[in-house]
Image: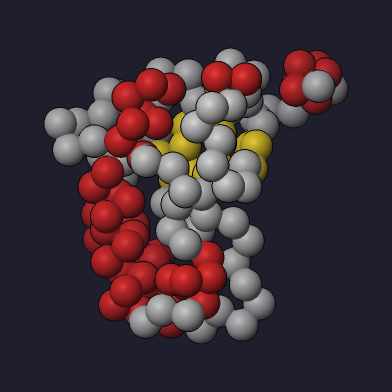
């Protein structure tokens, strides 16, 4: 399916997984460009797959973005960035951002990205 989408002109494929996919990532890392995840150990994922695919997500949409404080969002975003250090990671919610998410919480996540900056390309650092 992904090959057909690329043959039709797609520049990149972002595939969203819901829940734990630890036993199935091998099925798609060769076929997609970005995997949008929730509930994944970023360091373990990157050690296994970062040479083949970009990982995206892992900031909890409901428990943190919707129901948490801006400080909690920032702390979780910082933890994700640290775990994914070394590039090939897009800071993002783990799923769709709920409708009633406080704008301040979305800004808090975006501010962490600005604060940390862009990672250099390459392999994960020793923090991953």
- Asked where in the image residue 26 lies, by quadrant, the reply is top right
Horizontally, residue 70 falls left or right of residue 26, namely left
Horizontally, residue 24 falls left or right of residue 65, namely right
Front-most of residues 38 and 106: 38
Horizontally, residue 20 falls left or right of residue 91, namely right
- Residue at point 64% right, 43% down? 16
Percent of width and height locating residue 61:
52, 65
- Asked where in the image residue 13 lies, by quadrant, the reply is top right
Counting every numbered tag in the picture gives: 0
Q: Is residue 71 above or below residue 33?
A: below
Front-most of residues 65 and 23: 23
Q: Residue furthest left?
A: 126
Q: Is residue 97 above or below residue 89?
A: below
Q: Is residue 119 above or below residue 97?
A: above
- Residue at point 32% right, 74% down? 72
- Residue at point 58% right, 16% down? 30
- Residue at point 43% right, 58% down? 59
Residue 86 visible here: no
Residue 104 visible here: yes
Percent of width and height locating residue 4:
83, 18
Horizontally, residue 116 falls left or right of residue 44, namely left
Q: How is the image coloured?
A: secondary structure
Q: Which quarter shows the C terminus?
A: top left
Percent of width and height locating residue 6:
75, 21
Percent of width and height locating residue 125:
19, 31
Q: Which quarter shows the N terminus?
A: top right
């Amino acid at each position: 399916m992904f090959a057909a989408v690329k043959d039709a002109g797609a520049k990149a494929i972002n595939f969203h997984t819901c829940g734990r996919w630890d036993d199935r990532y091998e099925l798609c890392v060769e076929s997609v460009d970005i995997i949008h995840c929730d509930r994944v150990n970023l360091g373990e994922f990157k050690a296994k797959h970062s040479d083949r695919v970009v990982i995206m997500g892992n900031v909890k949409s409901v428990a943190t973005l919707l129901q948490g404080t801006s400080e909690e969002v920032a702390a979780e975003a910082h933890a994700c960035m640290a775990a994914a250090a070394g590039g090939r990671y897009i800071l993002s919610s783990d799923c769709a951002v709920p409708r009633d998410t406080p704008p301040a919480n979305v800004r808090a996540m975006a501010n962490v990205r600005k604060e940390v900056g862009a990672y250099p390309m390459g392999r994960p650092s020793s923090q991953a």
